[in-house]
Image (cartoon, rainbow, N blue to C red):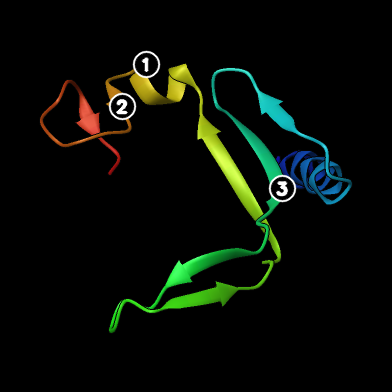
Amino acid sequence: MEKIVNAILGTIMTALARGDRVELRGFGVFAVKTRGARTGRNPRDGSKVVVSEGGPDLQDEPGQSLLHGSGGWHLGMAGVGGRSLL
């Protein structure tokens, strides 16, 4: 079982490293995106600061089955339907 899981995760990681978008139906969508340079604000004094381009960020979006789940599990606030994972 461990070899199967490792093979699947390896395939997903290879696809993400190539810049591909990975969709696992019902579970979620994963993609690697690079954040561009932008102007931000210093929270202490409110002055503008230039934020350089960032490195790659893994972005994920949970699927409907994971959000609203089966078996009573869902992502969200405690006390709202089934058992919360957050």
**Marks 2 and 3, how far apart at CA:** 27 Å
Q: Earlier in the sequence, mark 2 or mark 3?
A: 3
Residue that carries the numbered disc 1 in the rendered image: 70
Q: Is residue 41 left or right of residue 24?
A: left
- Crowding at dot 1, Cα within 10 Å, few <14 / some 14-19 / many 20+, comes out as few
The residue under the point 71% across, 66% down is 55
32, above or below 63, in the image: below
Judged by depth in the image, the label closer to the viewer, 2 or 3, is 3
Residue 51 image point, x, y percent: 58, 72
Looking at this view, is 23 or 72 the one in front? Answer: 23
What residue is at 50 percent from the left and 23 percent from the top? 63
Mark 3 surroundings within 10 Å by alpha-carbon count, few (fewer than 14), some (14 through 19), many (20 or more): some
Q: Position of residue 22 (x, y in %)?
A: 73, 32
Dot 2 falls on a residue whose secondary structure is: strand
Q: Give me the C-alpha separation between circle 1 and circle 2.
A: 6 Å
Residue 15, by quadrant, is top right
Residue 77: quarter of image: top left
Residue 48 is situated, as x and y percent measured from the top left of the image, at 45, 75
Q: What's under tag 3, amino acid-wise?
A: Val
Considering every residue shown, the one lying at the far front of the view is: 47
Residue picked out by circle 3? 32
> Which label was assigned to residue 73?
2
- Tag 1–tag 2 contact (CB < 8 Å): yes
Residue for point 47% across, 68% down: 40
Contact? badges 2 and 3 (CB < 8 Å): no
- The part of the image, by quadrant, that contains residue 37 is bottom right
* Rendered position, 63 above or below 11: above
* Figure quadrant of the N terminus: top right
On screen, residue 59 versus residue 68, left or right, reads: right
Of tags 3 and 1, which is closer to the observer?
A: 3
Q: Is residue 42 above or below residue 64?
A: below
Between residue 74 and residue 49, name the one nearer to us: 49
